[in-house]
Amino acid sequence: MIFVWYSKCSTCKKAKALLDESGVNYTSRDIKQDNPTRAELKEWLTKSGLPLKKFFNTSGTLYKSMLLKDRLSELSEEEQLNLLASDGMLVKRPILVGDNFVLVGFNREAWEAALK
């Protein structure tokens, strides 16, 4: 599994603690240092079954400063993917990527179910 997170994020720390407690093997990636690529994001989007908007960190300062709340609906999927790939701080976190699933954001129950 791949665990994509931001070490200064308290929610990400909770997700990491759950992973560590569960004893699963995972590779950790800091989203600020190692931003997901466009290809990864496209694959994760398909695997997650979520709308692309769910991959945006809508509470982040970068999202707000770029006024994406008002602009996102005007952008094509390709433009949105390129935007997400341009800066990890635009991407919602944490992300857990498994063989058959992708979880975006931390929902303890969903994560526990995926780890079983």
Image (cartoon, rainbow, N blue to C red):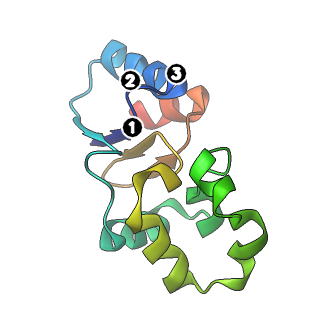
Between 48 and 64, the one lying in front of the other is 64
Residue pictured at 56% horizontal, 41% vertical: 105
In the image, is residue 99 above or below residue 46? Answer: above
Question: Dot 2: what SS?
Answer: helix
Residue 5: assigned label: 1
Quickly name the residue at label 2.
16
Which amino acid type is marked by label 1?
A: Trp
Question: Dot 3: what SS?
Answer: helix
Q: In the image, residue 64 lies at what x, y percent? A: 68, 54
Quickly name the residue at label 3.
10
Q: CA distance from mark 3 to mark 2?
A: 10 Å
Q: CA distance from mark 1 to mark 3?
A: 10 Å
Q: Residues within 10 Å of mark 1 (few under 14, many from 20)?
A: many
Which amino acid type is marked by label 2?
A: Lys
Q: CA distance from mark 1 to mark 2?
A: 8 Å
Look at the numbered discs 1 and 2 and tell me whether their residues touch, using CB distance below 8 Å. Answer: yes
